[in-house]
Every structure is written in structure tokens, then in C-alpha cells.
Image: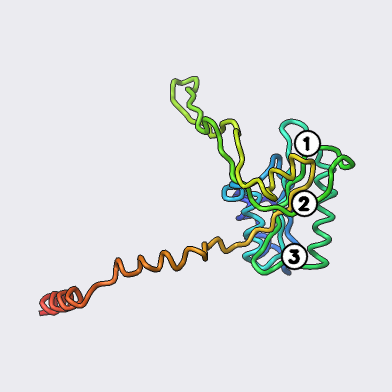
Amino acid sequence: MYAVNGTPVDCVNLAVLKVMSASPDLLVSGINKGVNLGDDVLYSGTVSAAMEGTILGVPSMAVSQEGLEHFYFDAGARYAVRIARLIQKEGLPDETLVNLNIPNRPFRSITGVRVTCLSRRRFDNPIIEKVDPHGRTYYWIAGTRVSWSRSKDADHEALEQGAVSLTPIHLDTTNYGALDRFRQWETVSRPNARQVAALSKLKGKQRS
């Protein structure tokens, strides 16, 4: 039995690179209390651990359970096992992990698994200002979720309809469609012939 005083990513690093004698067949991060939908994957320790496993070459998935006070973890565990077996049987594409979110309802009332994309959330009053007993101001990141975007095949939509959301996430977040546009900016820092000559002359003076 081991314990790590660090982040979920630290746990994965230490386990895979030091503690374990051989690389694991599968890495499962979770089950997290609360969903990791849409933009959550950018901040989530649960998802980050699965990302680190993927970087290290281990087939990985993150599992999160919807809920506030009561959680149907038995339902989440059963679906996690089903997807884990599929991953072990069929494998995952290169640099890809699975982000699994389970609706908070009994196993028999879940309507199945849906393959989804990441949604976008919009919050009302996301930063709450408060004062502690010592009169010091502090801030709480919270707010009320008021709307979602990207509703077609979105992860939040699956949960709202009682289904498990399965989102394949790729490590490479490069916007390839925008590369040609931004290549025009390469000329911004490229010196012209006159600037090159002046720079060479200045360097010559400095040497002398």
C-alpha cells in the first residue's frame, strides 16, 4: 500500500516510473465525486492523471460520477468496468484517453452509453467574494451554471438524458485549421536585409 503527498499526476508518475516493476495494462483515474464535463477537463486532477498515463504510454480513462450529496457509485463502477474491458480488448488510438461521466441514477435506469464531444459552460457570477471571521476578503470560484453551448452530441446532453457520456480526448490540442493563418505572423519578427546589415555592423564594433 502506498500514499503520495502530491497531485494525481504525481501519483501516476511515481507509480508507473518508480513503484511498479512493469507498466500497467490500464490506468483508471476516479471515480471522482462530481462530473468532469466540457471545460472541466482543462482543470481536473482526475482527467490530468489519465492524461499523464496516456503520455507515459498506458491506456487510460478518467471516470466521474454526477451528484451532490448522494452518489450512485455502484452504477458508475459497473459502467467503468464495462468500458475498461473494451479498452483492454480493443485498445485506444494513439495519444487518446477516455473521459467517462456517469449520470447520478440507479444502474437500471441509465439509458446506455453515448459517444460525445466536449461542451462549453457559461456561468453566472463565477467569482463569489466573501469575508472570513478575521475580516479578510477571500474569493470562492463557484457560480450558477446558466447555459451550455455545443449541444450536438455534447457530453452534458448525454447526462441530461440519463446516458453515460464517453468522450475520447486527444493529447494534441493544436488548432491545425489555424496554422496557415498564423504562419503569416512569422514575418513579423523576421529582420529585413537592412536590419541584418546594421546588426552585423553593430556586432563588429562590439568585438573591436
The x and y percentages for residue 180 are 44, 68
Coloring applied to the structure = rainbow
Amino acid on which the number 2 mark rests in the picture: Arg
User: What residue sits 83% from the left and 60% below the top?
Assistant: 85
Q: What is the number of the mark on residue 24?
A: 3
The x and y percentages for residue 197 are 16, 78
* C-alpha distance separating marks 3 and 2: 27 Å
**Mark 3 nearby-residue class (10 Å; few <14, some 14–19, many ≥20):** some
From the viewer's perspective, is the residue at label 3 or at label 2 nearer? 2
Q: What is the number of the mark on residue 18?
A: none
From the viewer's perspective, is the residue at label 3 or at label 1 nearer? 1
From the viewer's perspective, is the residue at label 2 or at label 1 nearer? 2
Amino acid on which the number 1 mark rests in the picture: Phe
Mark 2 or mark 1: name the one nearer the start of the chain.
1
Q: Secondary structure at mark 2?
A: strand
The x and y percentages for residue 203 are 16, 76
Q: Say which residue label 1 marks.
A: 71
**Mark 1 nearby-residue class (10 Å; few <14, some 14–19, many ≥20):** some
